[in-house]
Amino acid sequence: MENLIKNAIIKFEQEFMGRGPDEVKAFIVRDLIVIRLKGVLTPAEKQLAKTAEGVEMVKQLRQNLIAQGRDRLLEQIQAITGAKATALFTDIDTQIGERVFVFTMDRDLSVAVK
């Protein structure tokens, strides 16, 4: 299940962000799905992130794109897990080029993983 989630996130990043991350790891921890993406910034975002104003621009752009694709992403997670995602949290660290997604689910998924 973690591998299917990882692949869905890679595809989402490619389609919505214009490029995929260098590395993705997905973890199921009870009723949470935690996904860590490395190497997510485009060359243009790396340049923008050199100033405080640019960091905010990159973060805002990424948040807006997630908002547009949120429903699709939640549907994909539900299709993979069979559980409903009750919330989605995400943030990006522009200094190291990493992004984290955290989905809260309506039930414990760790039982299904074992």
Image (spheres, rainbow, N blue to C red):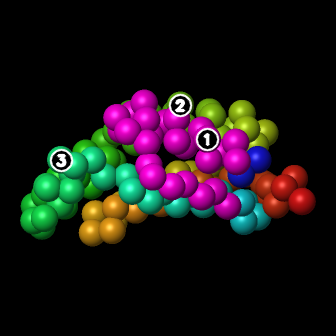
- Residue 86: where, in percent of width, then height? 62, 49
* Residue under pointer 1: 7
Label 2 sits on a secondary structure element that is helix
Give x and y (percent) for residue 34. Answer: 60, 60
- Segment colored magenta: 3-27
Residue 77 occupies quadrant: top right
Q: Is residue 13 magenta?
A: yes
The quarter holding residue 96 reads: bottom left
- Residue 29: image location, x then y, percent: 72, 65
Residue on which the image places disc 3 = 44
Crowding near pointer 2: few (<14 within 10 Å), some, many (20+)? few
Q: CA distance from mark 1 to mark 3?
A: 25 Å
Depth order, front residue of 58/30: 58
Q: Which residue is mark 2?
A: 72
Distance from the alpha carbon under mark 2 to that under mark 1: 14 Å
Mark 2 belongs to which amino acid? Answer: Arg
Mark 2 or mark 1, earlier in chain: 1
Query: Viewer-proximal residue, 18 or 100?
Result: 18
Q: Is residue 71 left or right of residue 97?
A: right
